[in-house]
Amino acid sequence: MPWPPWSKQKAAQAPSPTRQTQPKWTCQPAAFGSLQNAPRCIASHPGSNKNEGMSVVWQYSAGTRQQLSTQLFAQIGRYRHDIFIQQLNWGLNAVDGMELDEFDGPDAVYVCAHDEGGQVSGVARLLPTTAPYLMEKAFPQLWGGQQLPRDPKIWELSRFAATSSHPGEAIGHQASALHASELLHRVMRVASMLGAQMLITVSPVGMERLLRLNAFHAMRNGAPARVGGELLVSLSIHGNPRGPI
């Protein structure tokens, strides 16, 4: 499957304050089992939201629970707990301070942004629609009355978040960080490596804006509905401006 060059790649970002410096990217390949050519990319970011001039280094890792280190997977779970349960007040399950559900099994593939110490600042989960997945079990009503897909070329994106706050600090929304755009592109590329030609997702309606800003075509599969106080919509995502999905 076509794969764009990774060397010295500039990160695509949502509009940011003019005083901020764009990250400079240097990327190195790493093996993740079945994700043999998945990138593990390092960004040198000389500016940040909180402290102008502070050096921030992001790394991007991808793999299944079995392929990721125990420590990194635990950080993913704790980050999800902080964002989705503590900050956004979603009624989700917690296990030992981690947000995990029935779909965090061997079929799930994770993409995360973290610093050199393993502190996670962004997460996403990819699930094949050939196995049980979130929309199918929890939100079938959002699919507009059509038959939900079961296709090896269609994967589900869930639990997407990218924030710059430290644990416990208030956030604006689940994709408020400058690196949210870059994480989204990493997710799309990993999905492409897994054979996905389309992604589906159930997300707050604000996610549509992030997709548009990054030139992805997102089509609503049904009308938005309020679930647990949150206005959610099911989307089909096509088109990757940096290569096919």
Image: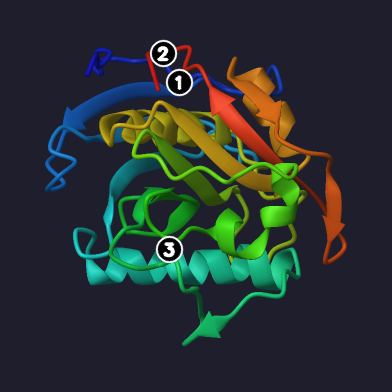
Q: In the image, which disc is placed on residue 44?
A: none
Indicate the secondary structure of the residue bearing disc 2: loop
Q: Residue at x 50, y 35 (%)?
A: 199
Total labels: the figure holds 3
Assess whether mark 3 and mark 2 are in contact (beta carbons under 8 angstroms): no
Q: Amino acid at mark 3?
A: Ile
Which residue position is annotated with label 1? 11
Q: Amino acid at mark 1?
A: Ala
Q: Nearer the viewer, mark 2 or mark 3?
A: 2
Q: Residue at x 68, y 58 (%)?
A: 139
Q: Nearer the viewer, mark 3 or mark 1?
A: 3
Q: State whether residue 56 is above or below residue 86.
A: above
Q: Position of residue 74 (x, y in %)?
A: 37, 72
Which residue position is annotated with label 2? 242
Assess whether mark 2 and mark 1 are in contact (beta carbons under 8 angstroms): no
Indicate the secondary structure of the residue bearing disc 1: loop
Neighbor class of circle 1 (other Cα within 10 Å; few <14, some 14-19, many 20+) is some
Rendered-image quadrant of the C terminus: top left
Which residue position is annotated with label 3? 76
Tell me if 42 is positioned left or right of 158 in this view: left
Neighbor class of circle 3 (other Cα within 10 Å; few <14, some 14-19, many 20+) is many
